[in-house]
Image: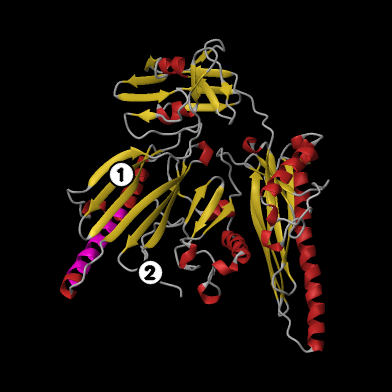
């Protein structure tokens, strides 16, 4: 049975986060202060790390344990936003919501304790646990978006407690503002998102409520967060699925902006719907805007739309003919349906190698237990003379051999998921798309695996073409290659020499040969790091990882990831066009 529960009605979820001016919501000062037995500790929380500095998000901890309540709260505190007034309001709102939850659980626990004592039974302590995850911390790598997911778990008796998910998404600009879905998916964002969520639910219908209790569409205040180029839509426990499904999430690729914050190719949605007694269709067709080759763009848009309309016309004719046959035979025919949706996998720009890549899924139902899906992919290189991207362009003349080997290895790891000996190699017209530095090879349903496997996909990393930047400037003064070489690590991280840069920035550098450890200080700021350990300590607080440990090269110097200077020392770092500037 679907359960109901109360939710906060303040604008805290989805894109209804915070108005342009919200002093009336700033009520933390009027809330009760945590009792003296509580402890408050601030420590850094690691978030995604970028070459250009994002915001800093630390955690404020409140813990309390009595006979009536057990409290473990971690509240995010945002620092470094360009709009400090908005930042203060946002921090106040987040803290206020947590404090209100704390106030409520204490009151409920106190009331329950009185009733338990009067009834002569032992009361199990009520529990409040609040945690958060930084999904995007601003900076150019996150298109200046800050996105936080908070999970509030409350237990007030019974077999288990109840989680609630709240999300906060803001654009870190001179005048900060909330992130709205229509900015990413267009004015028809609901149709596009609903179609993609419905398709995901259709893959595993047994995991979700059906009918009146099932998914009806996203709301105006839908909870979502931004992570790794996708909007992740979150539903509360019991909202669209049984408790065993937890808080369902659906990842939908963003289509309008890039991780560098610059406007690349824009991909909007053209929606076409048709409905009759024997046929329904919902077509979400991608429309490209901003390709350098406008003639190619017009042709591409025309081809994609014509294919969709041909699919609709053909199925509509088939449905009409079969409806006549059904009537003559005296049986009822379930309407045929056609659903088309797309996912923008790459939208051009330097981060995507100027490639634009779209995956289009056409779902056709003509009776039976389920429909059949077809996947079409379009990948082009956005240049003055746009051209279609082929696998041989990406992997060289012998591309089939390398790709076949990797796919074969993947299949060998899970042989029961595929038809025996079905994979013979990729074809000359193999479907694929580009996403996050990978070529994703895909196959149609039943091509190499049973229906339960859906559309099999295999990710093949694109060959790395990048080289280390050739110029490095510190404080506006360029360093020679003799003074400071730049390396690229195996995982693609830029490594720069620690001592010379730190000293040029005014830091004292102390080297401990025995421990292979460096201490850096300037005024009250103190940092330590050790060769071979991805653990950077700031002012003796919890260490931060950067995804790359310091290394000592053949020249005897220690090299650190470029993020060390932006994230740890809080320097201004810019990396572009083969050069690095640190100030």
Query: Which residue occupies the foreground of this view, 434 or 459?
Result: 459
Task: For marks 1 and 2, give the CA distance.
Answer: 28 Å
Residue 385 visible to an observer of this rendering: no
The local crowd at label 2, few if under 14, some if 14 to 19, many if 20 or more residues have their Cα within 10 Å, is few
- Give the dominant element type of the magenta stretch: helix, strand or loop: helix
Q: Residue at x 49, y 32 (%)?
A: 52
Query: Which residue occupies the foreground of this view, 69 or 385?
Result: 69
Q: Which mark is residue 5?
A: 2
101 is within the stretch colored magenta: yes
Q: Residue at x 53, y 23 (%)?
A: 495
Q: Earlier in the sequence, mark 1 or mark 2?
A: 2
* Residue 315 found in image quarter: bottom right
Say above or below: 402 vs 62: above
Say above or below: 480 vs 518: above
Say above or below: 403 vs 549: below
Residue that label 1 marks: 60
Q: Is residue 338 left or right of residue 544?
A: right
Q: Is residue 490 left or right of residue 583?
A: right
* Range of magenta residues: 98-115
Q: Residue at x 81, y 68 (%)?
A: 314
* Pointers 1 and 2 in contact (C-beta within 8 Å): no
261 is within the stretch colored magenta: no
């Amino acid at each position: 049975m679907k359960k109901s529960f109360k939710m906060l009605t303040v604008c805290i979820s989805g894109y209804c986060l915070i108005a342009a001016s919200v002093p009336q919501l700033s009520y933390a000062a009027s809330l009760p202060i945590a009792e003296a037995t509580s402890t408050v500790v601030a420590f850094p929380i690691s978030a995604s790390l970028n070459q250009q500095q994002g915001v800093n998000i630390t955690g404020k901890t409140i813990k309390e344990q009595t006979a009536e309540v057990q409290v473990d709260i971690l509240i995010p505190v945002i620092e470094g936003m360009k709009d400090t007034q908005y930042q203060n309001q946002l921090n106040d709102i987040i803290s206020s919501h947590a404090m209100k939850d704390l106030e409520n659980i204490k009151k409920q626990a106190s009331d329950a304790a009185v009733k338990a004592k009067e009834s002569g039974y032992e009361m199990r302590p009520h529990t409040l646990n609040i945690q958060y995850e930084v999904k995007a911390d601003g900076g150019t790598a996150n298109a200046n978006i800050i996105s936080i997911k908070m999970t509030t778990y409350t237990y007030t008796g019974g077999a288990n407690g109840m989680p609630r998910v709240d999300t906060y998404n803001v654009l870190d600009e001179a005048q900060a503002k909330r992130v709205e879905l229509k900015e990413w998916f267009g004015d028809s964002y609901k149709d596009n998102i609903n179609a993609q969520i419905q398709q995901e639910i259709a893959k595993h219908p047994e995991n979700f409520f059906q009918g009146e209790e099932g998914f009806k569409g996203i709301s105006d205040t839908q909870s979502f967060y931004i992570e790794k180029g996708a909007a992740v839509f979150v539903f509360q426990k019991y909202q669209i699925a049984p408790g065993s499904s937890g808080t369902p999430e659906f990842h939908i690729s963003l289509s309008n902006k890039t991780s560098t914050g610059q406007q690349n190719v824009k991909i909007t949605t053209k929606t076409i719907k048709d409905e009759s007694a024997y046929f329904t269709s919902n077509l979400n067709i991608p429309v490209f805007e901003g390709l350098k080759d406008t003639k190619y763009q017009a042709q591409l848009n025309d081809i994609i739309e014509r294919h969709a309309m041909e699919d609709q016309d053909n199925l509509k004719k088939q449905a009409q003919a079969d409806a006549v046959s059904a009537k003559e035979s005296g049986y009822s025919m379930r309407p045929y349906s056609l659903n088309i949706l797309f996912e923008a996998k790459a939208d051009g720009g330097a981060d995507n190698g100027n490639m634009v890549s779209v995956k289009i899924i056409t779902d056709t139902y003509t009776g039976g237990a389920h429909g059949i899906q077809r996947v079409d992919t379009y990948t082009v290189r956005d240049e003055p003379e746009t051209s279609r991207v082929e696998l041989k362009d990406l992997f060289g003349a012998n591309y089939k051999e390398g790709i076949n080997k990797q796919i074969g290895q993947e299949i060998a790891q899970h042989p029961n998921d595929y038809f025996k000996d079905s994979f013979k190699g990729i074809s000359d017209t193999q479907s694929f798309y580009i996403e996050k530095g990978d070529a994703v090879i895909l196959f149609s349903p039943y091509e190499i695996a049973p229906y339960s496997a859906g559309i099999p996909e295999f990710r093949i990393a694109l060959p790395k073409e990048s080289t280390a930047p050739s110029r490095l400037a510190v404080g506006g003064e360029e360093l020679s290659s003799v003074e400071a070489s730049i390396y690229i690590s195996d995982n693609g991280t830029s490594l720069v020499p620690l001592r010379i840069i730190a000293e040029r920035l005014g830091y004292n550098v102390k080297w401990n040969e025995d421990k292979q450890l460096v201490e850096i200080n300037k005024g009250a700021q103190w940092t330590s790091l050790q060769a071979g350990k991805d653990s950077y300590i700031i002012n003796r607080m919890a260490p931060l990882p950067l995804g790359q440990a310091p290394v000592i090269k053949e020249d005897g110097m220690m090299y650190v990831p470029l993020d060390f200077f932006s994230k740890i020392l809080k320097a201004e770092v810019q990396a572009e066009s083969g050069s690095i500037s640190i100030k």
